[in-house]
Image (cartoon, rainbow, N blue to C red):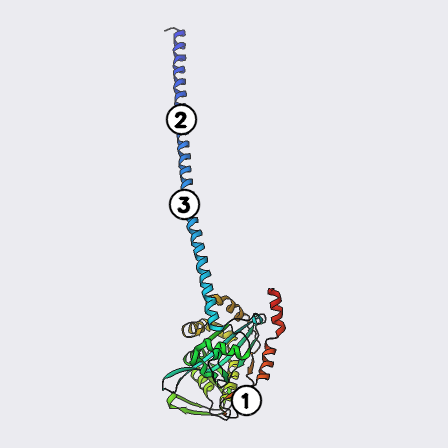
Amino acid sequence: MSEYDAEELAAKLQSENSRENIKKRRRERTRKHRIAVLKGIIRLIFAVFLMAVICTAGYYVIGWGMQAYRDVRDMYEAYLIRQEENRGAVDVRFDGYTNVLVLGLDESVNMDNADEKRADAILLISMENATGKVRILNIPRDTWVDMAQDKGETRLANVYAVGGAPLMVRTINQMFDISIHQYVIIDLVTFAQIVDAVGGIDLYVEQNMDYDDPEAQLFIHMRQGYRHLDGKGAEHYLRYRSDDLGDLGRTQRQQKFVKAFYAKLLRVDTLPKVPMIADILKQNVTTSAELFDSVHIGNVIRKLSIEPPRTIMLPGDFSRNDDTVWIMDRAATDEIIHELFPPEAGTEKQEEQN
């Protein structure tokens, strides 16, 4: 083979290799292009699917949210209706306060020899929302009252047996021309549990106390002097009224005990016991407060002043016809209510809302 033929053959082979390489590269590019297109299609399908999932989920989330909003709205409207039934309308004059009626119940026997519950202790607790200051009005259980809703006249203790807490609230609203925001009902057993939970109360027992009532299973025997009272001892101290002052002396002891209990609640060593106290209250105490009141009440309690509460006894005197009945002094009571709830504060509240 000549040199010319060899070169021609080499050129021919190189040319064939070049064409083969070109075809190979074209096929590779085509393959890569197809893969890229396929990936693009897959990404597009995934994106569409993801958007569909998001839109579907969003639709259901929005639908759930709207339904939840309607449910909460309906719950709140029902709550307002219940509160209106329990306590009557709330006057804007008292928006700056949280007024709570506390009723301590005592089981007794009526004229038909049937068990009935009456209000043995009646406290109107008012807290200034801005300052946390607490004022407590002690109302003797034997105060003679006109019941709300034209249900007649009776001792205040008996009102609970007639119409429960709602009638008690409306009657006291009527007595003082104020608004009560919530009520709390506690029985003697629960009261003793709470006193035990805080570790008992230290106070001075002002006289020897001896009283036996087998029918009520009540046996009180306490000596004068400084005493540490557990739940049962506190119950006996507050229920004793076999002295010259009768129910008046009992009310005065309630005032004294409330101050000591309030001071105990604010002590640092009481803080670890709060969950136990809350559990007792949750299980055994009846209250008008509901979920919608929790945040507000929590904020008010958090602001409680370290100052001792101001305790006031309902002004009045024993009836001339029955020395077991307490007759409210209307003029003196109006003066106290005016002092506790200045009308100027209510006027400012109304102006702010207008």
**Residue 197 visible in the current orientation:** no
How crowded pointer 3 is (Cα within 10 Å; few <14, some 14-19, many 20+) is rated as: few
Mark 1, residue position: 317
* Residue 332 position (above or below residue 63): below
* Secondary structure category for the residue under label 2: helix
Find residue 72 and report its horizontal and vertical position in percent: 45, 60
**Nearer to us: label 1 or label 3:** 1
N-terminal-most mark, 1 or 2:
2
Kindly report which numbered mark, 1 or 2, lies closer to the viewer in this rendering.
1
Number of residues whose C-alpha sits closer than 10 Å to that of mark 1, classed few (under 14), some (14–19) or many (20 or more): some
Which secondary structure, mark 3?
Answer: helix
Estimate the x, y position of residue 28 in percent, counting from the top left. Answer: 40, 26
The spot of residue 22 in percent (x, y) is 41, 20
Above or below residue 162? Residue 291 is above
- The residue depicted at 49 percent of the width and 76 percent of the height is 170
* Residue at the extreme top of the image, as rendered: 2
- Rendering quarter of residue 334: bottom right
How far, Cα to Cα, is label 1 from label 2?
108 Å
Which circle marks residue 30 in the picture? 2
Which disc, if any, is residue 53?
Answer: 3
Q: Distance between the residues labelled 2 and 3?
A: 34 Å
Q: Would you say 252 lies left or right of 7 here?
A: right
Q: Which amino acid does label 2 sit on?
A: Thr
Residue 170 showing in the rendered view: yes
Q: In the rendered view of the protein, which quadrant contains the N terminus? A: top left
